Amino acid sequence: MGKVYYVTKHVGLGLLVLAVTALVTIIALSIAYDKERAKNRDALGDGAAGGTSVPTPFTTPSGPKEPWDRYRLPVSLAPVSYNVTLWPRLKPGADGMYFFTGKSAVVVRCVKETDLLIIHSNKLNLTSFNGHHAVLTGLGHATAPAIQKSWLVVNTEFLVLQLRSGLSVGASYVLYTEFKGELADDLEGFYRSEYTEDGVKKVVATSQMQATYARKTFPCFDEPAMKAVFNVTIIHDPDTVALSNGMETGTADSVIDGVSVRVTTFEPTERMSTYLLAFIVSDFVHIKSTQNKNLLIRIWARRKAIDSRQGEYALNVTGPILRFYEQYFNTTYPLSKSDQIALPDFNAGAMENWGLITYRETALLFDPVMSSTGNKERIATVVSHELAHMWFGNLVTLQWWNDLWLNEGFASYVEYLGADYAEPTWSVKDEIILADVQKVFAVDALASSHPLTRGEEEVNTPAQISEMFNTISYSKGAAVIRMLSEFLTEPVFAKGLSSYLNTFAFGNTVYTDLWDHLQQAVENTPGMHIPHSVHDIMNRWTLQMGFPVVTIDTRTGSITQKHFLLDPDSVLDRPSQFNYTWFVPIKWMKTGVKQQQYWLLQETDSNSLMRVSGEDWVLANTNVAGYFRVNYDLDNWDRLLSLLNTNHQALSIINRAQIIDDAFNLARAKIINTTLALTTTKYLSKERDYIPWESALRNLDYYILMFDRTEVYGALQLYLKKQIQPLFEHFKTITANWTNVPTGHTDQIHPNLKSTVYCRAIAFGGVEEWDFAWRMFKNATLASEASRLRSAMACTKAPWLLNRYLEYTLDPTKIRKQDATSTIHYIARNIVGMPLAWNFVRARWSYLFKQYGGRSFSFSGLISGITKRLSTEFELQELMKFKEDNIHVGFGSATLALEQAIEKTTANIKWVAENKAHVLKWFNDESQ
Ligand SMILES: *[C@@H]1O[C@H](CO)[C@@H](O)[C@H](O)[C@H]1NC(C)=O
Ligand SMILES: *[C@@H]1O[C@H](CO)[C@@H](O)[C@H](O)[C@H]1NC(C)=O
Ligand SMILES: *[C@@H]1O[C@H](CO)[C@@H](O)[C@H](O)[C@H]1NC(C)=O
Ligand SMILES: *[C@@H]1O[C@H](CO)[C@@H](O)[C@H](O)[C@H]1NC(C)=O
Ligand SMILES: *[C@@H]1O[C@H](CO)[C@@H](O)[C@H](O)[C@H]1NC(C)=O
Ligand SMILES: *[C@@H]1O[C@H](CO)[C@@H](O)[C@H](O)[C@H]1NC(C)=O
Ligand SMILES: [Zn+2]
């Protein structure tokens, strides 16, 4: 799945704004920084989850339970193909309910004798045939046994048929059902999305199956390994268009039950998993391209969006990115068409349904006049991410959700390669450092982190599956796969990948299958050598949580590794079979000269080449190719700092960013002094590149959160203002004293500046400005514009406006459900809004939990968002009390986030106590 985003407010920008209050400066700086960059892909898509169900603690699967009380399907039956017909009603029925009806015939083959037929079915009203929920017939020579009894199991979401006698191994049967379901606005399964065009309310029927919602659309074997062919038919109003995974093969107008309808049929799909199905009925229109041989590429959206050419950019990049992957994977795109559609209501960022990818509007639609460069970058990377899944995930699918990290980590890594191919001038590959590596370093440095890989038996319930869609899976997955590609070299990596995809096409795998094919690629490459097998090297990164800090003492040449924990006093209660040591591939350079890759294979080692003196310096982890932090002896730190001050361009952009990020985090972990970390920001007065600045600002953001209610804040602002001044002058010069800003559109705000200007206007304005923004928000025809306004409205300083805004998040006619948690998050970012949001969430927990508890990602983000500033004993007690008070309600997919919040708050309290005095002194001294 793609990525949801909720941290739209640019941390760095917010900081600059606070530091430098003159509006013109803000505008100048935002040219450089307000790119609303890839960090918008922050939280990753989910949309998946067990509805409102409380996660059921899983007990041993081998207990005395009945087969239908377990969450996994028995292996006795294998689906072969389905005929599925769906008819969504876009107008409510007599009882006011929107609904759909459907029928399905699934051919199943019996592979192990059984007298039970168990199939997923959730929230569907099944038509009764002779008192049973389904009809079973034999195929060919097979005769189906009679149904003795049939029933639904709500908890495990099954339909169960008890047969009078056993099914025969090798024989095939047809299970036929007819059903009715609600077409709710719940963003799960087959659901309803509404929008208004020219004052007219329009209804769209659309779907989100990942991870466990296909079963809410029709009875099916809803597990990723239960692949089958789907023959889809959709019945719909004659003035709408129906889409599904395959190409439409015919439409016929007809009258059913006295209603004029159109019946659209689709070509049979390839053998595929249920979670990748998609069904959409809308009055949307499209643009298309046939630039890629034998392939129809279409972009679908609301008529107004297509008419104002908002689909053009996505169409422009899709063809090239698909061609890039065909070459990179050495496998042709396996379908005859590629549809991509932007939906007004969508929970995740995007979803890689095979042949019919669904997006939030902001992730697909681009307006050359209104959208920012950041919006454009997001579209390129999200499209690239989803298209990568067409092979990795869709063509070859992981056996079970416990391996989700490989699917999502892989797509989150190669999305940069695809986007870079489409937009070679953007240096988009460097962005992975901010958007994934540094982001997940922060989470994976906690004692409450968890390993990438989980045992298959640990992931069973829909809520447990949903919890897999987290930062560790996406971003750590991306970081370790990138490291693997770096130490294997890209050609060897691509060779192994191609062999894996070709071997398992249309099938399922476990992650070790990929390691095996990469290992073969290594063995088939003359001269290629790695110190252990791919399997043994990667196990240390995937089976144990966390990552090492590698310390190089350049006085002696000694090298050591140690599990990096942000809070050195935290208690590790998760033992590791590898004792928290890793096989670490270290790319490094000495005094500007690239050296041979060094493998640290033990806890302690030494390398005489790393012993240096005089003017020489060592820099390890060049281009941040490895997933680890680096520390040095103080002499080498001094030499690196003086290099930054004299000739920072001797180091790559991402290494400059990483030195800052490592130093700040080593200081947080008390491995180096806080003042050494702060000293890494002194060279910034010379820095003109985005990534190092952003890295510094994100780290200083922690200081802001901890100190923006104290006297440290004033000194910090003065220091930043001093550091930013030269950058300001730089942009003043290159924009010819601001006269080139904004170019070409003298009477309007340049899209790159909008977020900042909107936020400031709301912050300094009152209710009139706020209400104006609200009207603009409600009338916005471009989703990214609406999203900017929604974020800006959280900038007001008026508590009553913030409280009113918080209340709006409970009303879906005001704030769409897909945007509710992110809006609360924006409000919590605001220093005035934080306590209000915290009170609000505490007061409304059971309601919020009921509404969003299952949707893992945005929901866990809510907890981490509102607790970021907590740093006093009193606040910790409030947090503990919140946990206690709501144990009976539960925390669902935010359970882990709550534990992390408690751990972080505890660490914050200690950090503030230990650092406040000398941080204040440092900023006072340096801002002179
Ligand atoms: C679906 O269509 C394919 C190809 O025409 C056919 O082989 C298969 O039997 C059909 N499935 C069902 C359930 O009829
Ligand atoms: C599936 O639909 C096709 C075309 O309508 C039909 O020929 C076939 O018999 C159906 N298969 C089953 C198992 O009902
Ligand atoms: C399904 O049946 C239940 C119980 O009769 C009813 O309350 C519900 O509205 C029905 N759902 C639909 C979509 O008709
Ligand atoms: C899409 O490509 C066409 C042809 O190269 C170009 O004219 C147009 O400006 C592009 N549109 C966007 C939004 O990039
Ligand atoms: C590409 O695939 C073909 C067969 O499908 C194979 O012969 C060839 O070696 C592959 N090329 C690479 C670079 O893997
Ligand atoms: C971990 O430490 C234990 C005890 O010191 C030792 O027996 C074991 O071999 C170590 N395992 C690894 C993988 O280093
Ligand atoms: Zn994905």
Image (tube, helix red, strand yellow):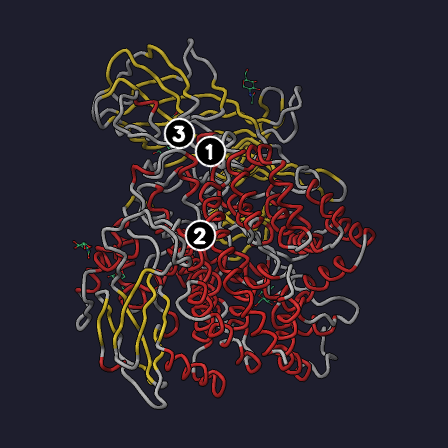
Q: How many marks?
A: 3
Q: Nearer the viewer, residue 275 or 914?
A: 914
Q: Position of residue 848 (x, y in %)?
A: 59, 36
- The residue lying at 43 percent from left, 46 percent from top is 469
**Secondary-structure class at tag 2:** helix
Amino acid under disc 1 = Gly
The residue that label 2 is drawn on is 471
- Callout 2 touching callout 3 (CB < 8 Å): no
Q: Is mark 2 within 8 Å of ligand 7?
A: no
Residue 220, numbered label: 3
- The residue lying at 53 percent from left, 52 percent from top is 298
Amino acid under disc 2 = Thr
**Badge 3, how many Cα within 10 Å: few under 14, some, many 20+?**
many
- What distance separates the C-alpha of mark 2 from that of mark 3? 30 Å
Residue 50, numbered label: 1
Amino acid under disc 3 = Cys
Q: Is mark 3 within 8 Å of ligand 1?
A: no
Question: Nearer the N terminus, badge 1 or badge 3?
Answer: 1
Q: Position of residue 756 (x, y in %)?
A: 69, 64
Give the left or right position of residue 289, taking residue 13 as reference.
left
